[in-house]
Amino acid sequence: MRFLAAFSLLLAFASPARAQVPDFPPAFEIREIPANGTTLHVRIGGKGPAVLLLHGYGETGDMWAPLAATLMRDHRVIVPDLRGMGLSAVAPGGYDKKTQAADMAALLDSLKIDRADLVAHDIGNMVAYAFTMQHRARVTRLVLIDAPIPGIGPWDEVLKNPLVWHFRFGGPDMERLVAGRERIYLDRFWNEFSADPAHFDEASRVHYAALYALPGHMHAGFAQFAAFDQDVIDNRGFLAAGGKLAMPVLALGGEKSFGPMMATIMRASATDVTEGIVPASGHWIMEENPQATVKLVTGFLAAK
């Protein structure tokens, strides 16, 4: 009943503008899949080699609709919402990326998928990295887009950038400060991290703000960042224990955001790194330049 009430709230906020937000093709099915002690909201479509798409903060799996529509022609595409985000269940804990990597392992196990390509953005990068470092044989190709990895490469320098003040935003009043003001809080990121804020359109803002306003979802979002200190410990441990990744890695940065730094980050922990730039884009690659992003990702996944 709580889920139905929350979903009704989402519809009330998002329906007037939803038609402008890219939809997944009708052939995609939507499932609620138990995984690692929580329940994930998952979109599944297409046939062929599996590809797992992981979203980041300020968005949900909905961001991947244009890429999923292309990939489903020759892939089985799996698009979850991360725990506590989108329409996935709000778990009481487990927002460190090692635990969320276990969510993804359980999800793939439930779908009987042994190996997959992995494409991720923002917080999704961090979950994808933790998954890949622990399950190297399960990842054929890895694409990480426009966000750092806690503890890896120039992480300490990234933390000094005033634009990432939210990495350390915490304390007992943070949720109370943004309650009922989710749109104001999220607009700050959509505006400051884009090359042109107009490219993150009003329909998308309404849609995602309504999702993050659902009960417990801002708490879960803050928990993603609060876990970074543990993520640093885990990621450095993964690298020390297993060495660098050997599978092909595409490190994509928005031209007006991380740019070539993404390749610098990944060369600290992978041996086969291809550098890519999404032109005329800031951080929000699927809103700002989806055509270029789709072309770069699909071209990399198709390479032999």
Image (cartoon, helix red, strand yellow):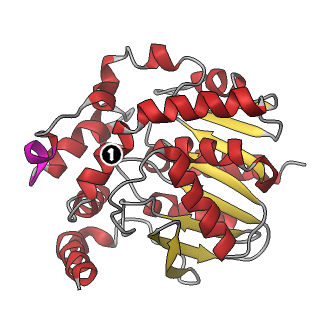
Taking the image as shown, residue 11 lies to the left or right of residue 223, namely left
Query: Is residue 281 at all visible to an observer of this figure?
Result: no
User: What percent of the width, then of the height, locates residue 150?
Assistant: 51, 30
Q: Position of residue 142 (x, y in %)?
A: 71, 45
Query: Looking at the image, is 97 positioned above or below residue 46?
Result: above
Give the residue displayed 67% in from the left and 44% down from the top. Answer: 143
Q: Which residue is mark 1?
A: 223
In the image, residue 63 sits, relative to residue 159, either above or below, namely: below
Q: From this view, report whether residue 228 is shown above or below residue 203.
A: above
Q: Is residue 293 left or right of residue 10?
A: right
For mark 1, give the secondary structure: helix
Q: Amino acid at mark 1?
A: Ala
- Foreground residue, 47 or 158? 158
| Viewer-closest of 206 and 172 | 172
Residue 111 visible in rendering: yes
Front residue of 210/233: it is: 233
Q: Is residue 177 magenta?
A: yes
The answer to if 5 sits in the magenta stretch is: no
Q: Magenta region's main secondary structure? A: helix
> Which residue is outermost to the right?
304
In the rendered image, residue 22, in percent from the top left (x then y), is placed at 44, 66
In magenta, the rendered stretch is: 175-180
Instruction: Give the camera-side residue of 68 and 235.
Output: 235
At horizontal 18% and vertical 50% (from top left) the residue drawn is 183
